[in-house]
Image (cartoon, rainbow, N blue to C red):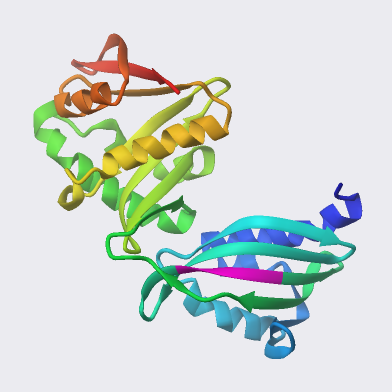
Amino acid sequence: MTSTHNADAAWPVQKQLDAYNARDIDGFMQWWAEDCEYYEFPARLLARGKAAVRARHLARFEEANLHGRLVHRMSVGDVVVDHETVVRSFPEGPGEVDVIAIYEVAGGKIAKAWFKMGAARLHAPGTVTIRPAALRDLATIRILTHAAYSKWVAVMGRKPLPMTADHAEALQRHRVELLHLDGEPVGLIDMIPSSDHLQIDNIAVAPEFQGRGFGRVLLAHAEQVARELGHGEMRLYTNKLMGKNIALYLGLGYRIDREEAFMDGFTVYMSKPV
């Protein structure tokens, strides 16, 4: 059982991890004390003070595929211990590393931290990873979406809705995740959790990577998300003129529920039990 005291100690640790994954340096640093100390476990001092810790992370936050996944956390008094798996861009290529992080919290800030790194595990060529998107990824999301849907403009006589959507708002309200191939973003999926189902609002794969199964990978990932949330149904909709997409969904077990007139065309609503 986690005491209130322990929960308070874990709060700044979780908030700095959230900011780390968003690569938000200002948000990250607000949870570190002015005189904080940053160690390689057990006792090698790497940085002292906020300015030095900030400098260590500025370059790291430029890594396109940076993401820390919390595996396990425990708190004892003012000490929080995290086991994380961190995806990094190493000089040898993209990969991941296990990290044990020990944080000493005082006054709602991280006063000291020790990090024990495991051996880097490089991803094999062609490795696919999926991670949550952050506001920093907004330009990538817009580029991927416009590239994926631009071929349908001539077919539909207008821009498909994902090309005109407010992606910044989607990042705040939806669950948007990016698919990376060898550390480079090549696809995305925008999911909206509801009370009893998970709706796919947008799925996009860069044109040069289409036809290689990444759309199926993203859809399978969405189904896993639905199961984790306790939802028993997937829902999506698409334009009737996008016949290739409809055929893909039908082949993956989706059914057509209805068609509705929309903007001189028809929207096809589909669902699938999971």
Residue 42 in which image quadrant: bottom right
* Image quarter hosting the C terminus: top left
- The range drawn in magenta is 96-101
Tell me which residue sits at (17%, 48%) in the image: 207
Tell me which residue sits at (27%, 16%) in the image: 268
Question: Is residue 206 shown left or right of residue 37?
Answer: left
Image location of residue 93, percent across then percent down = 35, 74
Q: Is residue 98 magenta?
A: yes
Viewer-nearest residue: 186 or 174: 186
Residue 162 in which image quadrant: top left
Image location of residue 14, percent across then percent down = 69, 58
Image location of residue 13, percent across then percent down = 72, 62
Q: Is residue 232 above or below residue 105?
A: above
Q: Is residue 161 above or below residue 141?
A: above
Q: Is residue 127 above or below residue 177?
A: below
Question: Is residue 95 shown left or right of residue 145?
Answer: right
